[in-house]
Image: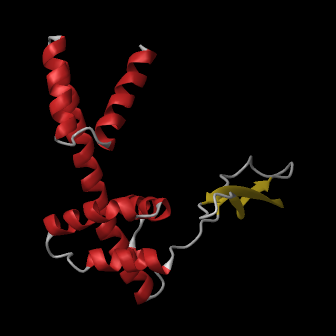
């Protein structure tokens, strides 16, 4: 079996105080195995992901420190969520769904997986509660009936800062589902 490694570049634009744009290319390796005639069809490609940064792990460790109180843990995750790098959010979601401490080879890895799972579960709970509040708000809008009541309900929700990412996610999902029907 031959192995093919193709560099895939992702570009990001860094802010500059002089309003010049600089782009950085950081290669990620994408591996796929090319089968020979006598071997089975293509295997699933694997993306080699970057590890969490020390800042990411410090954030996880700080949040994990309150692991004994589930409500406080969720509050800390909700407070830290706007400052979390998308890499960390994805790792936490993956850890909550797929990680197993039994697969760790050292005690340090096992402790890290437990931390990521605990904070990941709290993150999932926070995101689920945001989606549920978005569903409830959309249901309240749909139950208004009259356009003036709807206008008032939207204005009140905007003043109360309830028109958040969770609401717009639910709204977009409903629009997409309606367009399929």
* Residue at the bottom extreme, as displayed: 107
Q: Can residue 103 be seen in this snapshot?
A: no
Please count the marks in the image.
0
Along the viewing direction, whichever of 6 and 72 lies nearer the viewer = 72
Residue at 34% from the left image edge and 60% from the top image edge: 81
Please give left or right for residue 63 compared with residue 35 in the image. left
Query: What percent of the width, then of the height, locates residue 122?
Result: 26, 62
* Residue at the top extreme, as displayed: 146
Quarter of the image where one finds residue 157: top left
Query: What percent of the width, then of the height, locates residue 29?
Result: 72, 63
Residue at 42% from the left image edge and 78% from the top image edge: 57
Answer above or below: position of 58 versus 168.
Answer: below
Image quarter where the N terminus lies is bottom right
Image quarter where the C terminus lies is top left
Along the viewing direction, whichever of 84 and 124 lies nearer the viewer = 84
Residue at 61% from the left image edge and 63% from the top image edge: 16
Please give left or right for residue 97 compared with residue 126 in the image. right
Answer above or below: position of 164 versus 31.
Answer: above
Q: Can residue 12 be seen in this snapshot?
A: yes
Quarter of the image where one finds residue 2: bottom right
Along the viewing direction, whichever of 121 and 75 lies nearer the viewer = 75
Residue at 19% from the left image edge and 12% from the top image edge: 147
Query: What percent of the width, then of the height, locates residue 97?
Result: 38, 58
Along the viewing direction, whichever of 174 and 26 lies nearer the viewer = 26
Query: What percent of the width, then of the height, locates residue 71?
Result: 14, 64
What colouring style does the render use? secondary structure
Answer above or below: position of 147 versus 99.
Answer: above
Please give left or right for residue 180 compared with residue 66 in the image. right
């Amino acid at each position: 079996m031959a192995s093919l490694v193709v560099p895939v570049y992702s570009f990001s634009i860094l802010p500059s105080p002089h309003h010049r744009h600089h782009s950085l290319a950081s290669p990620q390796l994408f591996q796929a195995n090319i089968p020979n005639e006598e071997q089975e069809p293509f295997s699933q490609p694997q993306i080699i992901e970057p590890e969490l940064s020390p800042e990411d792990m410090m954030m996880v460790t700080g949040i994990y420190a309150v692991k004994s109180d589930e409500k406080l843990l969720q509050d800390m995750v909700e407070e830290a969520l706007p400052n979390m790098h998308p890499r960390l959010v994805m790792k936490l979601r993956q850890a909550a769904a797929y990680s197993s401490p039994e697969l760790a080879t050292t005690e340090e890895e096992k402790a890290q997986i437990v931390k990521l799972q605990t904070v990941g579960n709290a993150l999932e709970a926070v995101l689920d509660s945001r989606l549920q509040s978005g569903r409830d708000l959309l249901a309240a809008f749909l139950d208004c009936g009259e356009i003036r009541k709807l206008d008032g309900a939207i204005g009140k929700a905007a003043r109360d800062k309830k028109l958040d990412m969770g609401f717009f996610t639910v709204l977009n999902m409903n629009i997409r589902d309606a367009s399929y029907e």
